[in-house]
Image (tube, rainbow, N blue to C red):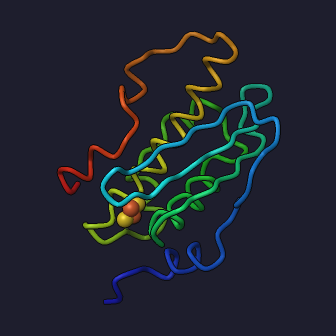
Amino acid sequence: MALYSEKVMDHFRSPRNVGVIENADGVGEVGNAKCGDIMKIYLKIEDDTIKDVKFETFGCGSAIASSSMATELIKGKPVSEALALTNKAVAEALDGLPPIKMHCSVLAEEAIKAALKDYYDRNGIPYDAADFPAEPSCAHCETGE
Ligand code: FES
């Protein structure tokens, strides 16, 4: 079996939603201290819905494919659904990632959460701190999960 699924290769070669949103309502940036990869997510939010989302990822192919798929999964969805997106859902939508690359999908989940937290903070919207990692960095990499 090929190491990477067709979907991973497709989203790596032709990533969706690459770029920057000027005047974004929320911006989240997370980095993986170990591999040095960085992911930045921009959200445009209207009526509690993700109207637009863009990303910039300086990282490995799996991180790029994960960012691309994650943006596709939350675009047009309610904020609550974006908040509930897990790295596992991203990896499943990509038809799987090799185990040693699962942490790359974690960056996508954390970057979206960081952008949503930024949106909440900017607008004074109360939120449950438990929904957000205390330190959005790839601690998962330390455990290899
Ligand atoms: Fe760094 Fe994939 S190896 S995010």
- Furthest toward the left, the residue is 143
Q: Quadrant of the N terminus?
A: bottom left
* Side of 15 relative to 91 (left or right): right
Residue 92 coordinates in the image, percent (x, y):
42, 62
Residue 105 coordinates in the image, percent (x, y):
42, 56
- Which residue is located at x 65 percent, y 53 percent? 55
* Side of 51 relative to 108 (left or right): right
Decide which of 126, 121 is in the foreground and name it.
121
Decide which of 13, 87 is in the foreground and name it.
13
- Which residue is located at x 42 percent, y 17 percent? 129
In which of the image's four quarters is ligand 1 placed? Answer: bottom left
Residue 50 coordinates in the image, percent (x, y):
71, 38
Q: Quadrant of the C terminus?
A: bottom left
- Which residue is located at x 50 percent, y 82 percent? 6
**Image quarter for residue 136?**
top left
**Image quarter for residue 91?**
bottom left
- Which residue is located at x 33 percent, y 56 percent? 103
Residue 115 coordinates in the image, percent (x, y):
59, 35
Q: Is residue 103 above or below residue 65?
A: above
Q: Number of numbered discs present?
A: 0
- Furthest toward the bottom, the residue is 1
* Side of 61 relative to 103 (left or right): right
